[in-house]
Image: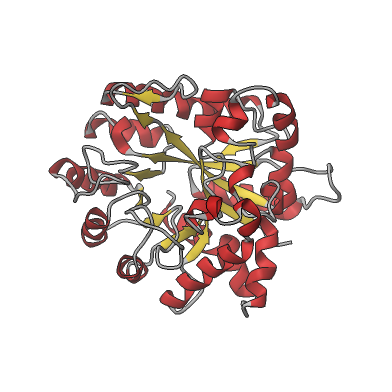
Amino acid sequence: MNWFIDAHEDLAWNMACFGRDYSRSAYQTRQMEQGTPIPAYAGDTMLGWPEYNLAGVALVFGTLFAAPTHPGVVDPMDKQMYSTPREANQIAWNQLGSYHRLCDEKPHAFRLIGNQEQLQQHLQLWEENPPEQEGSNYRPVGLIPLMESAEGILNLDELPRWWDAGLRVIGPAWTGTRFCGGTREPGPLTKEGKALLDAMAELGFILDLSHMDAAAAFQALECYPGTIITSHANASRPVRAYSGNRLLDDDLIRAMFERGVVIGAVPFNNFLAADWRMNGGRQSVSLSMVADQVDYLCQIAGDADHVGIGTDFDGGFGLQSVPRELDSIADLPLLLPFLSAKGYAEPELEKIAHGNFLRVLQSALP
């Protein structure tokens, strides 16, 4: 069985907001949440330790995420919102701490990966202990912390502390931040944003361009000397009825690939057909459309060396908003036959499933 790296999951946000325990099965979590407001708010979870193993998801980029508050808007379900950088900083540290606690308390299910030695040991464990049957010989999932929106960084002097605590990837934007323009709030890198990138490069952080406005992303591609990824984004052109600055125009995709960026394709219905709810609902969206996205990106790149998977699962949506073939992350391998039908051979499927993001980690982790 091929194995997977998922470059974007909002685990800590869900743990803090809803008390989700990802060492449980996704189906156990769903049963426990029946009759609560959580499924209506965030969707039925796609994630759980058994399902990771059934899919062969060996490594996950686990985010630190908090949303900015808006005047006059109260969201009682979202306990991870900030109105100042100091509040964002406290939330981010608490979320990173939650990953440490998860891995300390449940090492059979999760482990933090921060350097080459830990990565190699983890991959060796997965290679030497294939599951014999469902429910047998499950292995821990490796977590690589990723900060989504750098508002949680109070000042540049704090960056070494983040590094020492295990943070390895930083995305400066979600909406617009003091560092750059972002989703629904366009704009270039600010002076503070340029200084952030300089400081990140000195320490060896991976830069995540996801959510950055195109103007800022183009600047970052020019000035950032370190490793760059786009953990979760689709191409905008194939997405029916899409408008906005969240997805990627072709010229930005080309610029990313010229810099060797790996883009994580997202199996989220809003990023596959923006009008899906009004045109057939979930049953109208198929994993074939995710394969179309992967193929579209690969055609621009001219190879299969620059595309991976970034599901964004449990990122404020769940089962109700993913392609019809998916019931949990255990079904992620169902994507591969759609790619095979497009002519992708096994070595290319391996690159897309894990090889391209693994190459990033092997070159960028200390």
Using the image as rendered, state which of residue 325 and residue 231 is in the foreground.
325
Instruction: For residue 268, say whether it is visible.
Output: no
**Quadrant of the drawing holding the N terminus:** bottom right
Instruction: For residue 260, say whether it is visible.
Output: yes
For image coordinates 55% across by 34% down, the residue present is 42
Place residue 254 in its image quadrant. bottom left
Q: Is residue 140 above or below residue 120?
A: above
Place residue 199 in its image quadrant. top left
Give residue 201's position: percent from left, percent from top: 28, 49
Using the image as rendered, state which of residue 267 and residue 119 is in the foreground.
267
Give residue 79's position: percent from left, percent from top: 46, 21
Q: Give the tally of numbered discs.
A: 0
Give residue 37's position: percent from left, percent from top: 60, 24
For image coordinates 62% across by 69% down, the residue present is 349
For image coordinates 35% across by 45% down, the residue present is 171
Q: How is the image coloured?
A: secondary structure
Using the image as rendered, state which of residue 187 and residue 195 is in the foreground.
187
| View extreme (left): residue | 191
Give residue 361's position: percent from left, percent from top: 48, 54
Left or right: residue 224 compared with residue 41? left
Q: Is residue 13 above or below residue 305?
A: above
For image coordinates 72% across by 47% down, the residue present is 53
Q: Is residue 54 above or below residue 350?
A: above
